């Protein structure tokens, strides 16, 4: 089984005159594979939030129960993203990513046949574990196919897959509910079938490293090596690392990775605190119907697309690879938009504030992912991204579900919003610890620590 996932060995390099055209072809192929693939992951990760009002209104679930079920994904996903991230650093991403998507789709089909809170929680944990097989192979592909100077912008474009998948699920589910026999078919079965088809496409189109298809490393192709990188360091950058080296030389001993991991707790708390509760909050408090709240959910996701792209470009071109400054600016904007979303009674202002939160919160989400890859060798990219994800999901996502569900049930929505605003401030504080960090300074520190 593990041989099936093993990365392919490098093959003989293509003739020089074919390298440029082949690189362009494969880079596009790789990008589209992980973009469409990760958008599909979100179809079967965020559909439970769309189904939450049905569980409450038709099956009598409480918000605490909904939060408990949702927390299963955060707990399992956080652990999986770290553990599977480390495994993915030594796996072929095309098979690894596709396997996770197929397994997650199967679990989603099972959701539609289940009404037990306990069983739904168990299934959500399984879903979270398989979902953890999505981001790390994407990070591995990004680290191998895009160089340091372009990675912030390219990952910003790729990061919009979160929003495409997370945004499409609302209208897709509403279409499915109307066109198919039951709400379970629209919310769970239809997205699952689509994801299985996408997984087959990943197997067919995606590849592993440039060297596995006869191309030079991306640093050589782009002539974009980190500063002060000698010949030995260049060779080490292409060497597969052991688990011990990855963890103890480059991830767990890196203070900047720890800082962004802690920031990720509070970024994710705000992200999921808004996203997972939009349908419930707007229908219960603001008087929206299900269709209107679904379109607000859609706005949250799609407003993030231009915001994320602009933030990535700014971090590359204005802050020269420093991710923290623009990340903090985004979190200040999120705090203001949260306050408006909470206090406004205008339908227009509510939707504008939801859109602004979406446009701004995904900037730090993306930047933390880019920084995790920037701050370690590319052979440790999946583990570093998984480590930050462990904190984001196990801390932030779980609190967004369990803590906010409990707070709202017992103290009301006002307390829930104060909790999220406090988290937004803490995210800015932890990001500030990496204010002057860039790829070269962090790599130098990691090298000394090693």
Image (tube, rainbow, N blue to C red):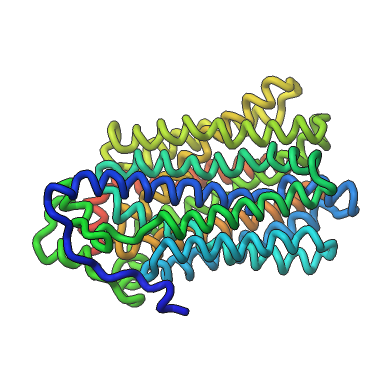
Going 72% across and 54% down the picture, which residue do you hit? Answer: 189
Q: Position of residue 348 (x, y in %)?
A: 69, 20
Q: Position of residue 405 (x, y in %)?
A: 75, 51
Pick the front one: 179 or 73: 179
Pick the front one: 138 or 72: 138
Q: How many marks?
A: 0
Pick the front one: 19 or 51: 19
In which quarter of the view is residue 94 placed?
bottom left
In the figure, 91 relative to 319: above or below? below
* Quarter in which the C terminus is drawn: bottom left
In which quarter of the view is residue 298 placed?
top right
Kindly tell me whether residue 413 is visible in this rendering. no
Going 37% across and 48% down the picture, which residue do you hit? Answer: 29
Going 69% across and 26% down the picture, which residue do you hit? Answer: 350
Kindly tell me whether residue 262 is visible in this rendering. yes
In the figure, 403 relative to 429: above or below? below
In the figure, 69 relative to 342: above or below? below
In the figure, 345 relative to 96: above or below? above
Pick the front one: 434 or 179: 179
Left or right: residue 432 versus residue 265 is left
In which quarter of the view is residue 398 placed?
bottom right
Left or right: residue 85 versus residue 392 is left
Q: Position of residue 322 (x, y in %)?
A: 31, 42
Left or right: residue 322 versus residue 237 is right
Going 53% across and 32% down the picture, which residue do you hit? Answer: 359
């Amino acid at each position: 089984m593990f041989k099936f996932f093993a990365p392919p060995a490098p093959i003989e390099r293509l003739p020089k005159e074919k390298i440029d055209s082949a690189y362009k072809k494969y880079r596009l192929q790789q990008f589209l594979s992980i973009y469409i693939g990760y958008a599909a992951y979100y179809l079967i990760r965020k559909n439970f939030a769309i189904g939450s009002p049905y569980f409450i209104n038709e099956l009598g679930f409480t918000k605490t129960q909904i939060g408990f079920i949702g927390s299963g994904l955060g707990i399992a996903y956080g652990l999986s993203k770290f553990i599977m991230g480390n495994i993915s650093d030594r796996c072929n991403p095309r098979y690894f990513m596709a396997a996770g998507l197929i397994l997650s789709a199967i679990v989603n089909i099972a959701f539609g046949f289940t009404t037990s809170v306990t069983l739904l929680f168990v299934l959500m944990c399984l879903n979270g574990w398989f979902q953890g097989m999505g981001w790390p192979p994407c990070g591995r592909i990004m680290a191998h196919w895009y160089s340091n100077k372009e990675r912030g912008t390219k990952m910003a474009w790729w990061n919009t897959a979160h929003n495409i998948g997370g945004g499409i699920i609302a209208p897709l589910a509403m279409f499915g509910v109307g066109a198919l026999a039951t709400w379970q078919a629209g919310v769970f079965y239809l997205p699952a079938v689509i994801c299985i088809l996408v997984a087959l496409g990943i197997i067919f189109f995606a590849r592993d490293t440039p060297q596995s298809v006869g191309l030079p490393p991306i640093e050589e192709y782009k002539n974009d090596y980190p500063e002060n990188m000698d010949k030995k360091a260049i060779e080490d950058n292409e060497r597969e690392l052991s688990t011990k080296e990855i963890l103890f030389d480059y991830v767990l001993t890196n203070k900047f990775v720890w800082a962004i991991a802690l920031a990720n707790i509070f970024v994710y708390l705000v992200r999921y605190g808004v996203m997972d509760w939009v349908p419930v909050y707007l229908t219960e408090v603001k008087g929206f119907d299900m269709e209107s709240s679904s379109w607000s959910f859609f706005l949250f996701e799609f407003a993030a697309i231009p915001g994320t792209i602009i933030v990535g470009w700014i971090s590359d071109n204005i802050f020269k690879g420093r991710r923290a400054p623009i990340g903090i600016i985004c979190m200040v904007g999120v705090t203001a938009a949260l306050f408006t979303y909470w206090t406004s009674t205008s339908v227009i202002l509510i939707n504008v504030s939801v859109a602004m939160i979406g446009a701004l919160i995904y900037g730090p989400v993306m930047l933390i992912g880019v920084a995790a890859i920037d701050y370690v060798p590319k052979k440790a990219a999946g583990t570093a991204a998984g480590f930050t994800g462990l904190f984001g999901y196990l801390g932030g996502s779980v609190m967004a579900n369990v803590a906010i569900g409990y707070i709202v049930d017992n103290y009301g929505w006002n307390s829930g919003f104060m909790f999220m605003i406090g988290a937004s401030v803490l995210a800015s504080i932890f990001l500030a610890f990496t204010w002057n960090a860039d790829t070269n300074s962090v790599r130098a520190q990691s090298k000394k620590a090693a």
